[in-house]
Amino acid sequence: MANRIALTAANIRYLLALKTLEKEGAGTRSVDIASSLGLSKPSVHNMMNTFTEMGLVSKNAYGAAFLTELGNETANRYVRYYDSVEGLLKGSFPGAGDVGSATCYLLAEMPEASLEALCRRTEAGKAE
């Protein structure tokens, strides 16, 4: 688990959107991410620059964002964490509505070792 990148709730939200929108080999346009998240294109542009500095994203000459190998690995882990934590929150608070923001905040605050343990318990419970 060495060399893991610490992510904020906002980083996680953008990363999950990017992973969801990314087409195989085609990258993702900032305008599509902005539309998906209900944010401005400049906000997305700034986050993509942050992700580029973190080594999670590369951009082509047209501005399309591509997850790097590190970006894909990180996004795949956080998709798994998100699914487990969101499922627990929805099960624990059935009338709460959208728990997506709360899920991202929890993911940002919990150590990855704890998230891994939670995922293993959640996945073991589904297999039974």
Image: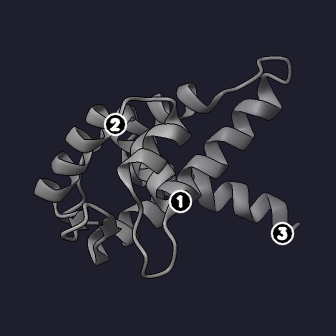
* Residue labelled with disc 2: 41
Q: Which residue is mark 1?
A: 21
Q: Mark 3 belongs to which amino acid?
A: Ala
Give the CA separation, mark 3 to mark 2: 42 Å
Label 1, label 3: how far apart the Cα atoms are:
29 Å
Q: Residue furthest right?
A: 128
Bin the neighbour count of mark 2 within 10 Å (Cα to Cα): few under 14, some 14-19, many 20 and up.
some
Residue 16, horizontal then vertical, whole percent: 49, 51
Q: Which residue is mark 3?
A: 127
Left or right: 19, with 3 as reference point:
right
Q: Is residue 115 above or below residue 28?
A: above
> Is residue 64 or residue 120 the one in the foreground?
64
Q: Residue at x 33, y 68 (%)?
A: 67
Q: Which corner quadrant holds the C terminus?
A: bottom right
Residue under the point 36% across and 33% down: 10
In the foreground, 125 or 93: 93
